[in-house]
Each structure stands twice: as structure tokens, then as C-alpha cells.
Amino acid sequence: MKKKLCLMLTILSLLFACGCDSIGEPSAEPYAEPSATSLESTAPEALPTLTLSQREREWLEDLEFLREACKTQHIDPFYLCSEEEFDWKLDQLSDKVGTLSDNDITLEIVSIVAGLGDIHSHATPPRSYYEREFPVGIIFLEGRAYLTGYLEGFEQFQPYLLREVVAVNGVDMAYLKEQARRLGNPFNSWLSQEGFWYSHFRPAFFDWAGCDYREGYTLQILNENREVESVEVPVVGSEEFTQGEWNYAPEYESLFYLEGKNFVKYVEGPEGGCVYMSLANVMWESNIRRLILEAGELFEARPDCDKLVVDLRMCPGGNAKFVSCFREDYAKGLTAGQVYALTGGSTASAALSYIAVLKDTLGAVTVGEPTGQFTSFFHMQSWSDEPVVLPNSQISVMLSNSWWDGDPLVEVQYDENGKLYPWESMILPDVYVYQDIKDIRQGLDSVIEWVLAQ
């Protein structure tokens, strides 16, 4: 821009000087029509053709392929993100393919698809994105990141288990969390926090987010005295990451809901217990029927128990039609006087239908944190729907082709165009209970402890 401005000023100066000379001494020569020869001689030289590398051409082809696919295969791509904004993002990225790394371009594509505001539409990076891993894990609690475990062989992290990670390479975690939200969902931070560990807590993300300004990686962690200590974190390959043995803080492992499995058990409390049902997977009707029958048997065996807890904190969805299981005759064995449905940032999609039926049939109270999705949303019409695959990078992109009008858990508000507002991207719980790090360091689940105290 500065060079162009200087050139314009120079041209204007020359024109001004020439103009001043001509004013003082007007030319007596009659005007003559310029000849074709003179036009040719004064024509500017042709600008050099911009040559693109094969890599750049392939990325540009992928970006145009993505643009066309989103506009033609998504049922309503510009429900929240305008077409102008979507095109602008792609154009900006197209201009930078020559200066950005493949990894950075990939994550920008993930961000652009996430920016549609539809969590069922998402881009999955290629295998290369997962080739470099950190041998440690984290979890977000109340907006803060805590170290939860490490791969065997990296015992240097043992003293820092359940300690807060405040930065990576000196880059504040609050900033990094906002960057992660660009890749998860820009309108729902609860969902993005839940997904950060398994989707983006790896070197490729931190390189894209700006932590690659120096070689290697260090975690800034608070010790017991809340002093910042810098701990170097190595990089391991994907095979070692997936096949190695993991060591977790024993207190963290006692949070059984984090197993992400379906099961029923009785949980004892200081003043009476509850029948606890972990509903992390709602894909199979027979499995849900079994859980309900097992819960009924526990109530029969413990007639003094009057609390049922259905934990949906790790349920990202599945098949909504099986909610009918809770309305059938055999569900009458769920005789609890108090029913609680636990929710969190991973609670989404079909899980919301289960919240609705628990409220409707059993009078459930929702407890925990906001859900990862609203009741009405875009989704895939069939489990067999295939993703769009960008031809060169092989980035896989799922695009919603249907709309689901969910159960009226809350009063829905629409704008002048008949659309949901961007902040209608979650369901608030009836009772807010956050996981407290002090509780977890004692092996306690804050949400269940609240239920047991009622």
C-alpha cells in the first residue's frame, strides 16, 4: 500500500509540474490524432503473470470445492453465518495459501465450517493432523484447564496432576480457549471446552493458535502454592499415544461418569443414596431397555431409596426415537420421588429428547451445566450419509441435510426471519452445579454430591 501511495504521489507531482509549464507557454502546435504506431510504442509493458505452485493450485481447488459443496449440499448454510461472511473468509484464506502451512490452512477450514454455527456440520483434519501428540491430558472445569493424566514413561508430570495449566509457551490459556472455540462452535463455549481435549489438545492446534514462535513446547502450570512453573512437554507419535498405558490422578478416576459408558449402580450418600444411570450412548434400544430394568430392580431391592439420577453429561446424541422406552409399562419400575437429569457441554442432539421425556414422564429436574446444543437444530437425515471429501487435502466435511424440531423444553424465540437467535444454542439447567476442583481433588463429583444432599 505504501509503495502504491508513493507511486501515485510521484505521478501527481509530475503531472502538476507538466501542467505548470504548459500554463505559462501554451503550445502552438495543432492537435494531431495519434497513430497506431505511437500507441503501440507508449503502451505499458504487460504485467508478469503470477505463477502458482502445484501446492497452491491444489489448495485453491479444495477451497472452491468446499465453497460449492457448502452452498449446494447443506440444507441452509447461511442460517447464522451470512453468505457474504462465508465467502469473505474463504477469499481471505485463498489469498494466504502461499504463506500458510498445510496445517494452518486445514484448521482455518475447520474454523470456517464451524462458523456456520451448526455442530452437525464439521470438518475433520486428515490423518497427518494426529501424527504428533502430547503425552498428557487435560480437562476444563469452570473455564480453567487442569492436567488429568500422562502416558507411562512421562512421570515428570505426576506432581502436576489436577494442577491448573495457565499457558502454553507463555500464551495465556484464556486466549487459547477462545481459539479453540473457533474450531468447535463460536456460539457455545460449553461444547467447545468439552471437545478441546480430544479434538485439539495437540501440537498442531497450538502451532495454529500462535504457540510456534519458539522451538518446543512448555506448559505453564500452577504448583501447590499457585506459583507458575514451566514444564517442558515432549511430542510423541500417534501410535505411542493410542497404545501406551495412561496414568491418571486416582481422584480423577473416581469420577465414574467420565468413563462414557452405559451402566446402572447404586450410589451411597451420607443421608441416603440414589439409583444412578449413566446414559452415555443412546444408539441401541435393547441397551436402554436393559438399563431401565436394572434401575427398576435396584429400586425394588432398596424401597427406602427415592432418588433417580440419569446422567447425560457424556451423551453427545444417538437415536431419539428410543425415548419411548421411558414411557412404556416396564419403566414404571422407576418409582423415585425425586428424578434428576445431569447435563453438561457434551449433552447434545438426541440427548435433549431424553431430557424432555424425563421431565415429561418423571418430572425430572436438570442439574449441572448448559448443554452443548439447542432443542432444534440441523442434522444428518441418515446415518449412512457420506461426508464431502476435498479432492486434494482429503479433508472430510460433514454437511447437515435436514432440520430437527425438537421437544419444547424451553420457550423458543424467533427473529424477524423466523430463525433462532445465535444465543439459542444451548439449554440452561434448572440448577447450576459446576464441577469444583477442590471436590475432585477429594474424589468427589460435585453434581452428584449436590443431588445426594437434597
Image (tube, rainbow, N blue to C red):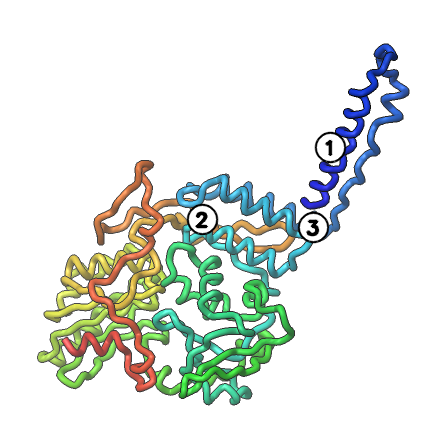
Q: Amino acid at mark 3?
A: Glu
Residue designated by label 2: 116
Q: Position of residue 350 (x, y in %)?
A: 32, 57
Residue beneath label 3, please? 56
Whole-number angstrom distance, CA of label 2 to CA of label 3 = 25 Å
Q: Is residue 290 visible?
A: no
Q: Position of residue 270 (x, y in %)?
A: 16, 86
Cα distance in 3D space between marks 2 and 1: 46 Å
The answer to whether residue 449 is above or below residue 60 is below
1 or 3: tag closer to the N-terminus: 1
Q: What is the secondary structure assignment of the residue under circle 1?
A: helix
Residue 178 in percent (x, y) is at: 45, 62
Residue at x-position 44% and y-position 79%: 147
Left or right relative to 132: residue 112: left
Label 2 packing within 10 angstroms: few (<14), some (14-19), many (20+): many
Of the numbered discs 2 and 1, the one sitting upstream in the chain is 1
Mark 2 or mark 1: which is in front?
Answer: 1
Q: Which residue is mark 1?
A: 12
**Image mark count:** 3
Is 224 placed above or below 320 here? below
